[in-house]
Image (tube, rainbow, N blue to C red):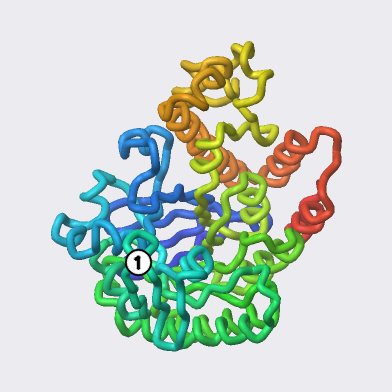
Amino acid sequence: MSTPTNALCASKSLEFEIIAADGRARATRLAFNSCKCFSPMFMPVGTQGSIKGLTSKQMEEVGCQMILGNTYHLENRPGSSLLQHLGGLSTFVDWNRSSLTDSGGFQMVSLLDLADISEKGVSFQSPIDGKQMLLTPERSMRIQNRIGANVIMALDDVVSSVCLEAKRFEEATHRTLRWIDRCIAAHQRPSEQALFGIIQGGVDLRLRSTCIEEMNTRDAHLPGYAIGGLAGGEEKDAFCRVVAQCASKLPVNKPRYVMGVGYPLDLVVCSALGADLYDCVYPSRTARFGTALVPEGTLRLKTAAMAADYRPIDDTCDCLVCQKYSRAHLHAKITKEPHAASLLTYHNIRYQMRLCDEMRQAIISQQFQEFVQSFVRKQFPNNMVPEWLREGLSSAEIAV
């Protein structure tokens, strides 16, 4: 497919351009007031603005373009008023590149037992001190305006994707649409911070279509869109159908962000289906359990076989860890020294950045299908490709 050079959208807070496309996959540029990012792009999750075990300088070294902070947790500690006083989250954590804050909506799932959801908003009991916090669309916008991230997310009503109550998904989808209007009205820094709407609806394609159609009527106020409510345990074929449908129906000239996606294979599939941005705790969390990301999948450094393995984690990786440390070295330290988990986090995030770079270059060079096929062969060398993966990629006209 030729490059759609006219697929550009400019708002005061975000300029978005499609640099190249190959099939449904896109290589894009996002320009904010002070920095630029290129997709496909993975965003590591720094719950309180920084990644556990890594400095901001190290995040730059691994090629991170944007980090994600959590609105609910940042308001709990250290507080958005303090962050605003100090010049925003980026200044607070010494981060000179882009940032995104979620709305706090995900905590409706992760802290469900501590949450009470109503039309007004969601009331949380703090897991730290037990205090109540009422998070409304207006308060979420106020907190995020103070935090000062380049991209802020609308507060949505999030339901676990494995919930069995159809009425709850219906309720949440329509509430998300009512709340987006309140978020738009409350957003005080539209020329500085790009507000993304979130598409909800579970795995119900009808609800997803309804949400997209209604969001499109607010398009003038939304520089980008996210596909929310996935990556929570739903069947993988349903996951792919939702991503494929949403990516095909969302505006072509706006970024598409699939929330909560971090498995490398999912990044490749979602990019093939037309998505641009991703976030997840997976690379850093799995590192703390002694697992490294490699082209063949994962490498468990705690296993006995690693004790006398003097190879690097990945001999194709250019990161400091792969250049300096052996598998045996990391095996000896992974259960005893926090530093080893930091080293694995460094490698894993670099792996994700390299993967996104490689996808982007493959799209630009019109070789994305070949890239995907090669990636899948490494993950499934015996050609035991799961049916959901074959079907998902077939939607992008890629055979594996």
Counting from the top left corner in percent of width and height, residue 98 is at 34, 52
- On the picture, is 22 further left or further right than 390? left
Vertical order, 150 against 184 (above or below): above
Which quadrant of the figure contains the N terminus? Answer: bottom right
Dividing the picture into quarters, in which one does residue 12 lie? Answer: bottom left
- The residue to which callout 1 is attached is 130
Q: Residue at x 51, y 67 (%)?
A: 226
In percent of width and height, residue 187 lies at 30, 77
Residue under the image location 45 percent in, 28 percent down: 343
Amino acid type, label 1 = Gly
Residue 170 location (% of width, % of height): 62, 85
Percent across and percent down for residue 167 are 65, 86
Spot the residue most to the left: 85
Vertical relation: 14 (above or below) 28: below
Question: Residue placed farthest to the front in the image?
Answer: 130
Q: Is residue 148 left or right of residue 310?
A: left
Left or right side of 96 for 352: right
